[in-house]
């Protein structure tokens, strides 16, 4: 039994509605007293990262709207249920905690940002892309039951130009410390296409954070190629706000 057996026939059927031709994002309206949860991996979970910056922005510029952001990020998490061999233990899997989160408090919108870990830094495959797509639709079907909408963020890039990883000659398996050389171009860009092409009644649209972070990677990354620095989180916040009407 694998960790993804919960995926239903209806979720698989939803895969057939995927449209890969991208459409231009429209402004997304935020209303008074909205609660917005931010769901993702360690990039979302970062203390004083883009989630806190979004809260600071609305508190400063739109305090009367009483919009609240919740940080539901979890380090290392995926929506594919995969773990690379050299990872210290199984990666957290969103669907092992999603029901508990959705039952804990009502949220109006979820900002959803997964992908950097979901391919476990390995080579592309049709099975991987199907698993990622099914994970997105499974999430959207779950929140549909709660009457919650989602804003899908593309995964951020693997910024190897700004923060290269030294090859480990003793490592033969790909992973976060030894990524597949074309993980950015062959896996993450495909994940971005999938996010941008999702069509679902509970998706308000997609926001591309990948392109600006990649374009400005030398400013937005320094310690490692996975986690944006403070300038990177500011750029994520600015990009999200640019797609909102508040």
Image (tube, rainbow, N blue to C red):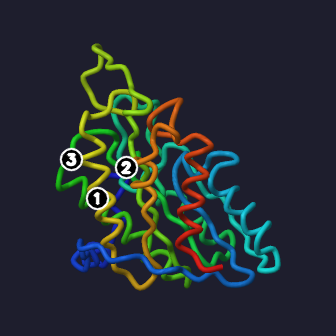
Residue 70 sits in quarter: bottom right
Mark 1 and mark 2 in contact? Answer it, CB < 8 Å: yes
Residue at which label 1 appears: 131
Badge 3 marks a residue whose secondary structure is loop
- The residue sitting at 55% across, 60% down in the picture is 39
Badge 2 marks a residue whose secondary structure is loop
Q: Residues within 10 Å of mark 3 (few under 14, many from 20)?
A: some
Where residue 236 appears, as percent x and y from the top left, is: 55, 56
Badge 1 marks a residue whose secondary structure is helix
Residue at which label 2 appears: 118
Camera-near label (3 vs 1) is 3
**Disc number for residue 124:** 3
The span from disc 3 to disc 1 (Cα, nearest Å) is 12 Å
Residue 107 sits above or below residue 118 on the image? below
- The residue sitting at 25% across, 53% down in the picture is 128
Where residue 11 appears, as percent x and y from the top left, is: 32, 74
The span from disc 1 to disc 2 (Cα, nearest Å) is 9 Å
Residues 219 and 42: in front is 219
Quarter placement of the C terminus: bottom right
**Disc number for residue 16:** none
Q: Residue furthest left?
A: 126
Residue 79 vs residue 246: left or right? Answer: left
- The residue sitting at 37% across, 41% down in the picture is 83
Residue 202 sits above or below residue 195 on the image? below
Q: Earlier in the sequence, mark 2 or mark 3?
A: 2
- The residue sitting at 67% across, 62% down in the picture is 54
Q: Earlier in the sequence, mark 1 or mark 2?
A: 2
Q: Residue furthest top?
A: 170
Q: Residues within 10 Å of mark 2 (few under 14, many from 20)?
A: many
Q: Residues within 10 Å of mark 1 (few under 14, many from 20)?
A: some
Q: Residue furthest right?
A: 64
Q: Earlier in the sequence, mark 3 or mark 1?
A: 3
């Amino acid at each position: 039994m694998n960790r993804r057996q919960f995926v239903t026939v209806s979720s698989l059927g939803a895969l057939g509605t995927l449209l890969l031709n991208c459409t231009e994002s429209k402004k997304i309206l935020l209303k008074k007293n909205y609660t917005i949860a931010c769901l993702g991996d360690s990039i979302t979970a970062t203390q004083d990262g883009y989630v806190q910056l979004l809260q600071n922005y609305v508190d400063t510029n739109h305090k009367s709207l009483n919009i609240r952001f919740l940080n539901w990020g979890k380090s290392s998490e995926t929506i594919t249920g995969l773990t690379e061999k050299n990872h210290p233990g199984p990666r957290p899997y969103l669907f092992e905690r999603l029901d508990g989160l959705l039952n804990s408090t009502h949220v109006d919108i979820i900002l959803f940002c997964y992908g950097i870990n979901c391919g476990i830094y390995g080579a592309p495959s049709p099975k991987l892309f199907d698993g990622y797509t099914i994970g997105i639709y499974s999430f959207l079907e779950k929140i549909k039951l709660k009457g919650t909408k989602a804003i899908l963020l593309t995964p951020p890039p693997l910024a190897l130009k700004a923060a290269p990883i030294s090859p480990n000659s003793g490592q033969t398996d790909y992973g976060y410390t030894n990524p597949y050389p074309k993980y950015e171009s062959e896996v993450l860009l495909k994940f971005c296409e999938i996010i941008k092409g999702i069509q679902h009644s509970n998706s308000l649209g997609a926001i591309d954070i990948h392109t600006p972070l990649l374009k400005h990677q030398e400013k937005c990354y320094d310690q490692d190629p996975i986690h944006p620095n403070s300038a990177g989180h500011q750029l994520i916040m600015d990009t999200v706000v640019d797609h909102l009407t508040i």
